[in-house]
Amino acid sequence: MKFKSVLFLALATLPFCQSPAQITLVDNHRPKASILLTDTTHQTRQAAELFNLFIGRMTGTTLPIADRQPRRGGVVAIGRDADKDYEDGFTIRCSGNKLAILSGGDKGAALGVAHLLTRYFGCDYYAKDAWRAPQQRTLSLPAIGSWSETPAFRYRQSQSYGNEDPWYKLWFGFEEPHDMFVKGMWVHTFDRLIPAEKYGEEHPEWYSLINGRRQPGKHSQWCLTNPDVLEAATRQIDSIFRANPQQRMISVSQNDGNNTQCHCEACEAVYREEGAVSGTYIRFMNELARRFPDKEISTLAYLFTMQPPKKVKPLPNVNIMLCDIDCKREVPLTDNKSGQDFMRAIDGWAAISNNLFVWDYGINFDNVVAPFPNFHVLQPNIQIFHRHHANMLFEQVNGTRGTDFAELRAYMIGKLMWNPYLDADSLMRSFLDGYYGAAGQPLYQYRKVMEGALLASNADLWIYDSPNSHKDGMLNPHLMKAYNRLFDQAEQAVADDTTLLRRVRMARLPLQYAELERLRTEPQTDVEGVKAKLELFRNRCSEYSIPTLNERNNRPEDYCRLYLERFLPAATPSKALGATVSYDIPPTGRYRQIADRALTDGLYGGASYVESWVGWEGTDARFTIDLGKVKDIHRISADFLHQLGAWVLLPKSVTYEVSADRNTYQPFGRRVDFAEDRELTIKFVEGSASVPVPVAARYIRVCIEGTIDCPSWHYGVGYPSWFFCDEVRVE
């Protein structure tokens, strides 16, 4: 694929024709021109259909489509320009009763149509099934000398749910992995190419040496200095390309997981020589690229491979997919430590490669339906990628309905991936006014107040955030009142328009969720009030078909059910409420800061492990709860978090022992064993024991057997696993 430099023309948006007409398309709702298809490709016909779709929406009529020159009337020629080869670019000319919308390749004709409709007729596409097409009796165009544009990035992917609407997707020219890559071979492909389940037992030497032994597993990496691995990968890739001769790009990339690279002597020697783990990866990919010179080999620069090597350079047909997953989002990538680590990486890769694919994250994976005010960093970050001559970009933002201003985020990203130097604030205002009508102004104020509050709080914003990380900052009670007042104004402004009111109320869901999350961490005096807020949230999520609250597909209805069962005060308080806790095996790291109170404060942790939970890494746990005096006990339970994506596994078991004097302990009930759970869904799992006759005791010793290391099927194969415990309840 050839790629030309971006050509940006600063032409003003003209909602209606201001100059003498060169061509009249529709006159008094009647067609006055025909569409001429200059070729028979699917892309050209799609572009013509998109053009006619909006002509019909504006005027109530459409233009006839022909594959040969019509005898009378104006002509709209749409199709491929044989003299030009610039992917997704277009050229538009209008003179002498003829309009030409010509493609430089791929989606160029459709993108030319979208830009023409936007600039000259005031059309726009806001979200799934939501567009602007001003009603007009007559459509005419002035002379257009030669207007050409090419996108900033040859590949532009957004995870917007709006992509379910094919016309929306075409309007922005959004791509999908299968448009470029062999189907099923896009990121984390090592185990798909050489499955450990198939080859691990016979060839453990093909897989990472971790902690002194070979660790074949679904998320283990390859031993890239082993020549047999290169031959095995070559055979697999060759067979894949033979089965897909029309495709020319494949991802050969590390499995998901961090620090799981091979530590054998040969691999370690390359790391030292290259100054980075990526050295073995690029040497390996270069060998593959030499064997497939007419193909592109894409590989990840992700987590432990993010930093570039010092010596080896990727061959031109090696595509580097650089990921900024560890970066915080409250400021641009140039302005905080995590971003500056990434900047060193992108500086290094840009110095040795012109074939960069950036994977940028703008989503809260643990709480997708929660405020995530990073709009102010979208443009500066995209500009960084463009200045470093990245030519492919994936903005992983809001894949589902209900995420924080999902439609606005996708709209701005779509526009900025085409041209990173547009006025981002104007884009925001244009969208808010177009999509929300009279509610646009208070919603703009809401976005700006929250942005300022985030920056003033000096708090991090990251992709595994909890709203409660910001309850003393941008989500403090005073600001929450201000936000709700602005949403009240927005709802009142569109109260008579069912469609607009529905959009505003869906945009309010993250604020309602944040309020519920804050309330569950505080002692409750108004339980009925909380229940009413929860019921409203449940009903709105159901009405607007919100599918999930996090990337692990936990459904809103399950959240609401668990909230009632888990977070609201129980009818009978725990006898351990406020009890002191002492540790024989203390929690790990920063979790010691809350360990003296978190297990007996009556408050339960949520989906994110960053608040309320007490965690241990790579060890067992043992602690004692002092009830203050002897009490009758018939049931003890402890709460555990299951979140595989964060290396948080259930422990193997928990046992309880009780004592009246802290000298002599006796077992309480049976040991609780936890079954291995490989589901990605976030879960809260109780481990409880009971006795038929209450036992008098003051001290409770809790002994938890951890999994210690991540198993072979897990992301962190061979490395210490975590388990998290929260409330210990005594009845």
Image (cartoon, rainbow, N blue to C red):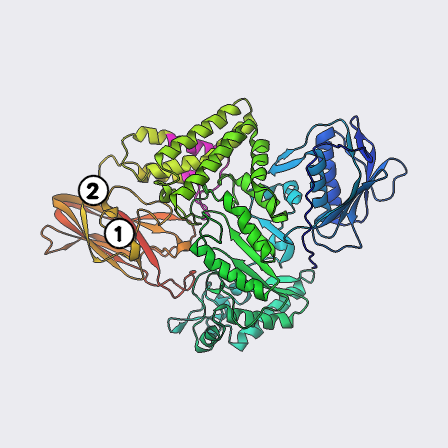
Give the left or right position of residue 438, taking residue 588 as reference. right
Residue 549 part of the magenta segment: yes
Q: Point out the image quarter for the C terminus.
A: top left
User: Mark 1 — residue?
Assistant: 593
- Distance CA(mark 2)–CA(mark 1): 19 Å
Q: Amino acid at mark 1?
A: Gln
Q: Point out the image quarter for the N terminus.
A: bottom right
Which residue is at the far top?
496
Residue 277 part of the magenta segment: no
Q: Amino acid at mark 2?
A: Leu
Of callouts 2 and 1, the N-terminal one: 2
Viewer-nearest residue: 636 or 356: 356
Q: Quadrant of residue 388?
A: bottom right
Q: Is residue 261 above or below residue 563?
A: below
Numbered mark located on residue 298 in the image: none
Residue 197 location, x and y as percent?
Answer: 48, 66
Residue 19 location, x and y as percent?
Answer: 78, 33
Give the left or right position of residue 710, taking residue 5 as reference. left
User: Residue at 43% of width from left, 56% of height from top?
Assistant: 337
Viewer-nearest residue: 568 or 154: 154
Q: Residues within 10 Å of mark 1 (few under 14, many from 20)?
A: few
Task: Specify start and end residues of the magenta stretch as a single range.
Answer: 533-558
User: Mark 2 — residue?
Assistant: 577
User: Residue at 67% of width from left, 60% of height from top?
Assistant: 247
Give the left or right position of residue 476, taking residue 18 as reference. left
